[in-house]
Amino acid sequence: MSYVLGIDIGGTFTDCVAVETDRGAARASHVEIGKASSTPPDFETGFVDSISTVASRYALTPSAMLGSTTAIYHGCTVGTNALVEGRTAKVGLLSTRGHRDAIFIMQGGGRLSKEPPEYIAHVASHRKSDPLVPKDLCMEIDERIAFDGSVLVTLNEDRARRSIEALVERGVEAFAVALLWSTVDPRHEHRLRALIEEIAPGAFISLSSEVSQRHGEYERTVATVMNSLVGPAMNAYLRKLEVRLEEHGYRGPLQLMGCSGGLMSVEQARVLPVLTIGSGPVAGLIGSAAIANLSSASYGGDIITGDMGGTSYDVGMIVAGEPVTRATVSYEQYEYYAPTLEVRSIGAGGGSIVKWDGPTLRVGPESAGARPGPVCYGRGGEKPTVTDADLVLGYLNPDYFLGARLKLDVDGARAAYSKLGDPMGYGPEQAAAAAVRIVENQMADAIRLATIHRGYDVRDFTLYAYGGAGPVHATGVARELDLQRVIVPLSNFASGWSAFGIAASDAIVIAELGAALASPFDAETLNDHWRHLEDQAQQKMSAQGISANKVSIERFVDMRYTLQVNEIQVRAAPGHYTSASVDTLVAAFEREYERLFGSETGYADAGFTISGLRVRAAAPIGDVPFMQIAAASNGARPGGWPTRRVTWYEMSEVKTEDVPIISGEALAQGVEVDGPAVIEYPDTTVVLRPGDAAHVSDIGLIVDVTRKQDGGRS
Amino acid sequence: MAHATDQWNGRDQSYRSSPDWQSRIESVELHEQTSDVDPITYEVIRHRLWTINMAHGETVLRASGSPVLAALDFNMTIMTETGEFVMSAPFSTFLVGGSSLAIRFVLERLSRAPGIEPGDVFVVNDPWIGANHQMDVLFLHPVFLDGALFAWVANAGHHYDLGGIVPGGWPQNAPDVYSDPFCFPPFKLVEKGTLRNDLEEIILRQSRMRDLVALDLRAQLAGNKFAHDELVALCARYGPDVVKGAMRKVIADAQAAFSKQLSAMPDGRWSDVRYIDEALPGDRKTYRTQLNVTKQGDRLVIDNDGTDEQVEGVVGIVYSTFQGSIMGALAVTMLYDELFAVGGAERQIDFRPTPGRLTCVNHPAEVSGGVMNCETHHHAIHTIISGMQGTVDELRKDIYAPGGDFPLAVLTGEKDSGAYYGQALLEAYAPGTGAGPGHDGVDTGGKESAPLAKVVNVEMIEQWYPVLYLYRREAIDGGGVGSRRGGTGLESAITPYRARTMTAVTNTGGQGVSTAGGAGLCGGFPAPPSRYTVRKDTNLLAWFADRRLPDSVDDLEAGTTIRLAGKSNPIELGEGDVLELRVAGAGGYGDPIARSPELVANDVRLGYVSAAVAKALYGVALAGDGEADLAASERLRAEILNDRAKWSRCDAGKGPGDLPSTPATGEPVRRLQEYIEAKDERDLRVLACAQCGEVLGDYASNYKHGLLIDEGPLSVLPTAPDPSAFIDAQMVLRRYCCPGCKVLIKTEVARAGEPVVDDMRLGSAIADGMESGLALALSHE
């Protein structure tokens, strides 16, 4: 027997999924999940604890399990935590003279584009996020390269040296070097690294040309600074982790989850730790895509993922089996280059506060968070939240929340909603139903915006619901959007969903190149670029011991019409390019542009521009058999479920009835459940409204949602 | 003044709907039926309307792909069947002010013939019928349900080019409308769902870039179509009467919220005076505008009394902009909780500008380039709103000083490849934002009238245009000084790179380069003005060869140095020439010598304030290590206070109203702004210094008459030029302090010899003057 481990460190818990495989056998024989408290700042302790927990399920010691583990796939929040808690390195920034302020200007009002409308509207409250680096730790370097690669001002090494020395004197322990047009010619950045290594040996150094090859100094500089901020903390963590794993006799590979949705080697994570930030929400998307791509089943073509936690609702999208990607990541009001998956957040979570403000009832974006948390947590929270509403409506079981780890105070929640409902003349159930109706509509609106943004019709999608509160509201959201199907993936193992996603990921290397190519494109130039990028990607793969024959390579270009700003990623053909393949590429661009933006929206007379080339190398390494995982829970269907009073809303009407409460863990594959019903799992609850029909499949719970009874779209 | 029948007719004067306008709607059935909507359905529909409107904008952006629209120089709305605002958006907030006017014009004048039918779309860019200027083309799309006109969706967007004497549509040198981009009144571009190609061609034929205009036009149509379809779907879900009920309630709620805020303010009249330089390049004259807001109970009357008559040249705005800027400013200052539902506020306002004045020009005035002055006007109303909000404790947190006028430099020429280029440098999208009680302004924070507008990466601009950026940074000393410092603006310098030819022209609103940037509030200073510097034949290449880059264009040796005026004709730039554009910051808040010395020292350390300004204006001395020298600072500040003690009593224009005569009210002390309060002093109600209690005058007096005044040159402001370089008028900075404690209470830029501005005059007797106007306003509804 051998094991593959997927380990996900979250803010509160560290989850470990162990997949047992019989060497030589094609199928996994058993899956277990273990949970331990996260242990910041020494995350490696929680990491090992989670292995101990899961090992005990197999009656093994952690060392025994690690001794027969073939691979560990790991998602970690070490970088994110360092940022949030301010345990970052003291970073000095070197930029081209005259351009230090790009990261302070933050594109002016452009920094507000991801803020919620309530904030944008309130101009008096606008501020800037705190600087990533104090201005007096930023030095300007005399050097200048033009967009065409001409070196207009040669690097002034004497002055640069003095600047670096000054930063060292001020206690800088990590450097970020971000020069204009280093994407075209990185020679000055390379030379500065040599100078820093000479003056400050051992300091962590990030070069913008190595962090991102995209043009745009603001996003690239932020990425470079972020990389240096978290670099030392990440390296320290990885060192300690490797020591602990060695102590337990583990000699296999350690791969880290990246925000691109793929795994990367620990060596790469040391150099580019910024790519591990934000990998958490992405893991769920990868898991969903993995399920959707299972060939045997129709698990719903195009997919919306809705991940509802305590403070936010994160929406992702998978189209034709591929998660929708994005070139930048947001951190506070900053935006930086890192290839990632599109996840849009709104402030609607279980902890979102519900308030009556005179003419209307409003939900969020303020959140009670985990402390004091919802009223029903009994931790001093006094403001009613969405979770309190779920409890009042009977959706949540006060004695079986988080697998009975937290006992909920129903009376407290009812009292809060009773008070909230007073001015509207509503009783507690009606007030709670009102709150849920509003939040479900907000979630639906967020999904509408996300799909419109990409040019899709939302009604064609299947909703994958996860996160503790996601499945509670999924059927309500689906009805509002006229979606027909909701899937709660691996419902039995909902809490380990991210860890599963990590274990299901491929090793991914993305090599990119910023460009400014104008049509007509020269096939040979493109061939040179592809060769260069593919060599780079293959080298990184082989550096982590993955042989070339396992690697599949895809090519993409970023293209736009020369006089227009909408830039899209287009898949480019493999192989050697001729002028005919260039024509094919342009035609593919025009087709995709029309699909996204509508017919006759492109202006071809102005010509075309390629602004970037990208190679995505992927190698399957995880290969976790999802279908066996879900099937692993063998239950039967006992009759005589207990019931609970549950309140439904239909527009503004509410109706309370006794509804069967079903233990999800006991349901065998193939069992069908008709709504109304509430299905309880250790870490989540699925609410089936009257008319909904669910069945337990090999990948989790599949719900066919009843259509709205009060009219659909005309 | 014109005859009553010619007033507001949309030909000579701007169009406004008369009280009986609805009686002239023909052949169109209005959907006026509403159902009661419960608060929950209401909140759901309200959120959905917001989502539809934002997605409408998204649809326009996606379909157009225009860099102009991508900079968010557009906006979109949902309106009722009679053109009341239900939803607007935080893009260019002043842009859709006129869609209400244009819709009413269409209903009143075109409903009989050619008629308004399902699937029609009307288009208009006539500034006298709702457009902001000719470049901001309005598209109006009626929404019909079962044959009745249910609502309108509309958008306005800035097009690339629609003809006229200067490419791009901001001519700095157009004498009148006949040199502007072409101007068309509303017509039906789409008839029952079919785009009229013959009419489209009339628009495209005027443009230097017809194909791109065609794209934008289709994008705007697509956005409206999307919003139309979503609105129809929403009605199918909830029923038209419920949706209409919700729309009415959005407006009514905004109206109630606005009324509530107004009711909390004391009655009175607030005014703001702004100047505009140069009607045309080379003109050295200065023109005066004045905006007055009279508040009584929960209503406002807004007029432009005191504004100069319109003249030939690039200095005026139309009624649509006058009103649109005011609604845009109200949206982000008083209606933010209502998500831009400005229709409700509009019901409480009677706009009474006199036509033929600079802030309400008549045909055939130049408008397309003069629209730069909409920012000037926006800052005037913003200053007034801040003054009014300052009188209410709960609202005071929302006040902040305004930003500066908009400086625009347009570069045109040929690249070394021979390709033509021509585009504005939009560095002015990152001015500072203003300081307020409790917070400094945001450095390079953005434009208050277009909060999401962004500056584009240097690495993008250098690909598009043949320029090399020597620097782009946050300017030192760019924000107005104050106990809370105004945000500083951008400072950028370029030199031609791989250009065969390059010329630059400038166009600037207000007094953007001659006097000051954003005005100060409550004793905070104005920011220094914007600045265009051209240095020709510099030794830049020698610097490059020496492996050096200049920190400032002033460090270079140059043949000639030219400070460009606000409006200037083309100047050529060649190799070794540099152009620096400094974008003004926003105003400061509160007496600068009340700023904590530690904060000032920190500003100096981070490069936001120079040591010289720290000493001269903040009264802060720095020790060798850069920390504040507290003892020395205390001495400096004592000297500043001593100087203020020598200022003279502000007696000028003191009238009988200034003698205390308002009887005591028995009400408690009421704070009116940072340093002024109203209180009972024995049997009289008076204005007094909130800091030391010194009585300044009668409750209904101009408080400035009780202050000490200093009138001096604007060179007090750091980096400010001598205005006489650009204009003949003698412009001064007036500072007012309390005769008791000498705290700085007010600063203002004025033309020497003009009476002190009556910026806040409290009392219902003052407001009574608006009664007649009020009656008129009510009859409009």
Image: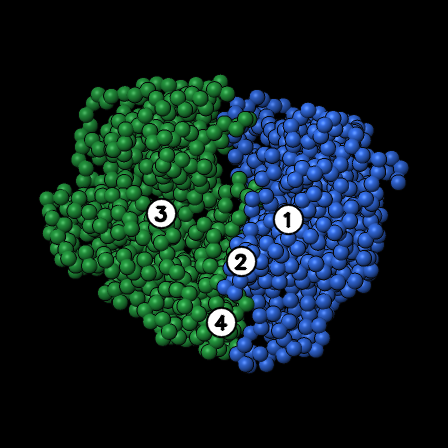
Task: For marks 2 and 3, give the one nearer the viewer.
Answer: 2
* Image coords of residue B609 (percent x, y): 58, 59
**Which chain's residue wears label 1?**
B
Circles 1 and 3: CB atoms closer than 8 Å = no
Distance from Cα at disc 4 to Cα at disc 1: 38 Å
The blue chain is: B
Q: Nearer the viewer, residue A529 or A139?
A: A139
* Residue depicted at x 66% and y 46%: B743
Q: Label 3 crowding class (10 Å Cα cut-off): few <14, some 14-19, many 20+? A: many
Distance from Cα at disc 4 to Cα at disc 2: 29 Å
Residue A687 in sight from this viewpoint? no
Circles 4 and 1: CB atoms closer than 8 Å = no
- The tag earlier along the polypeptide, 3 or 4, is 4
Q: Secondary structure at mark 3?
A: helix
Asked if badge 4 and badge 1 are on a common chain, one would say no
Circles 4 and 2: CB atoms closer than 8 Å = no
* Residue on which disc 3 sits: A281
Residue A141 got which mark?
A: 4
For badge 1, the amino acid type reads Asp
Q: Secondary structure at mark 2?
A: strand
**Which chain's residue wears label 4?**
A
* Residue on which disc 2 sits: B628
Task: For marks 1 and 3, give the one nearer the viewer.
Answer: 1
